[in-house]
Image (cartoon, helix red, strand yellow):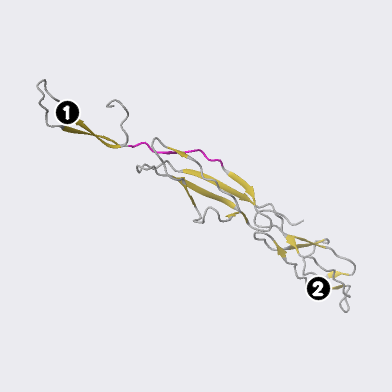
Amino acid sequence: PLDTEYPVGTTNITWTVTDDNGNEAQPVIQTVTVTDDQAPVIAAVEAINTTADADTCGAMIEIVPPTATDNCSVGNVNGTRDDNQPLDAEYPVGTTNITWTVTDDNGNEAQPVIQTVTVTDDQAPVIAAVEAINTTADADTCGAMIEIVPPAATDNCTVGNVNGTRDDNQPLDAEYPVGTTNITWTVTDDNGNEAE
């Protein structure tokens, strides 16, 4: 019927008439064109906050695209990471933004939606085991000059320099007196986690 909804696109109406004596008019065609200018809408997304996977400086996260609605029909919502990696690639420690976009079947683009993925590092670095140093005093002195080599440290991300502190508050390269001196080794990774 003429009073039903007209779909997006072009619909032709053919007008005809016959007079009381049976004479038919030349038909007239009227076009009704409906265009769609309503943009689709992407559903709200929640920020993702997680910790790094064990022994790695990132996290594997299953990303589920948001849904989108439209007055006509809409395609798939597409996500683009700001580091240009695929959505299923590991997310590094820090914040990665995903921009979600979609275009409906009539070319209308949705307002992009940004989703943040934040991965934090809570894994402490580990300082390699150290061996005790036992030596005798240098000749004619009541102590010994000892070359102290800091132990290595490992971390799932990046780790700074290992620092040593003597319990007599002297520099590591100062003479070690006869007796026992303890060196406490510490290190902090780039994300603020201290070795235990």
Are circles 2 and 1 on residues that touch, CB within 8 Å?
A: no
Identify the residue shown where x is 35% and y is 42%. 106
Which residue, as the protein is rendered here, is positioned at the far bottom? 139
Task: State the SS at label 2.
Answer: loop
The image quadrant that residue 133 belongs to is: bottom right
Q: Which residue is mark 1?
A: 16
Asked if residue 191 lies in the magenta stretch, the reply is no
Q: Which quadrant holds residue 36?
A: top left
Residue 158 screen position, x and y as percent: 65, 60
Name the disc covering residue 109, or none. none
- Whether residue 171 is situated above or below residue 41 in the rendered picture: below
- For the N terminus, give its image quadrant: top left
> How many labels sit on residues?
2
Indicate which disc residue 146 carries.
Answer: 2
Q: Which amino acid, by three-letter code, is at mark 1?
A: Thr
Measured as percent of width and height from the top left, residue 172 is found at 77, 67
Q: Between marks 2 and 1, how big is the CA–CA gap?
A: 111 Å
Callout 1: few (<14), some (14-19), or many (20+) C-alpha neighbours within 10 Å?
A: few
Q: Is residue 2 above or below residue 169?
A: above
Q: On the picture, is 24 further left or further right than 101?
A: left
Q: In the image as oriented, which residue stretches furthest toward the top?
A: 20
| Predominant secondary structure, magenta span | loop
Q: Which residues are magenta?
A: 36-46
Query: In the picture, which quadrant includes the C terminus?
Result: bottom right
Is 38 covered by the magenta stretch? yes
Task: Say which residue appears at 88% left-offset and 78% top-offset.
Answer: 140
